[in-house]
Amino acid sequence: MPLSPDIWVYALKRRVELGGAFATIARKGDARAGAVLVKLYNPLTREARLYAEATRGDGERVWMEPVQSDVESELDAYVQRALRIDPDLWVIEIEDKQGRHFLVEPVEKR
């Protein structure tokens, strides 16, 4: 059984902090049923990435980039649209100078 979103988000935040980066929970969603978006920002390159959880056809949980952009304003616009559709959504923002997302599940490349 997968972790509930609230526990998963706080665990990711802790993993980020232990790795020497900064994370903030920008939006708290439903503790038991909310989906999660992870926004990554690299202040050195000024690039941003957004990751959304998904399930592949084989049932494996993966992360994918729902927006093919590294412009932060475009990612923020996607998050706002997603919040209108899913008010239970969690959003965690990570700032890391090395560009690490700290996700342990597979990440699908663009």
Image (cartoon, rainbow, N blue to C red):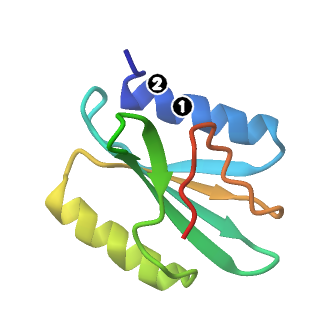
The quadrant holding residue 10 is: top right
Q: Which mark is residue 10?
A: 1
Q: Residue at x 81, y 41 (%)?
A: 19
**x, y percentage for residue 81?**
24, 71
**x, y percentage for residue 106?**
57, 44
Compared with 35, 74 (above or below) is below
Q: Residue at x 78, y 80 (%)?
A: 45
Q: Give the crowd class for mark 1: few <14, some 14-19, many >=20 residues within 10 Å.
A: some
- In the displayed orientation, state which residue is furthest to the front: 58
Q: Residue at x 57, y 69 (%)?
A: 49
- In the displayed orientation, state which residue is furthest to the left: 85
Mark 2: amino acid: Ile
- Spatial CA span between label 2 and label 1: 5 Å
Q: Residue at x 49, y 35 (%)?
A: 9
Which one is in front, 15 or 56?
A: 56
- Dot 1: element: helix
Callout 2 touching callout 1 (CB < 8 Å): yes
The quadrant holding residue 109 is: bottom right
Q: Give the crowd class for mark 2: few <14, some 14-19, many >=20 residues within 10 Å.
A: few
Compared with 90, 64 (above or below) is below
Give the residue at mark 2.
7
- Dot 2: element: helix
**x, y percentage for residue 105?**
57, 38
Mark 1: amino acid: Tyr
Q: How many marks?
A: 2
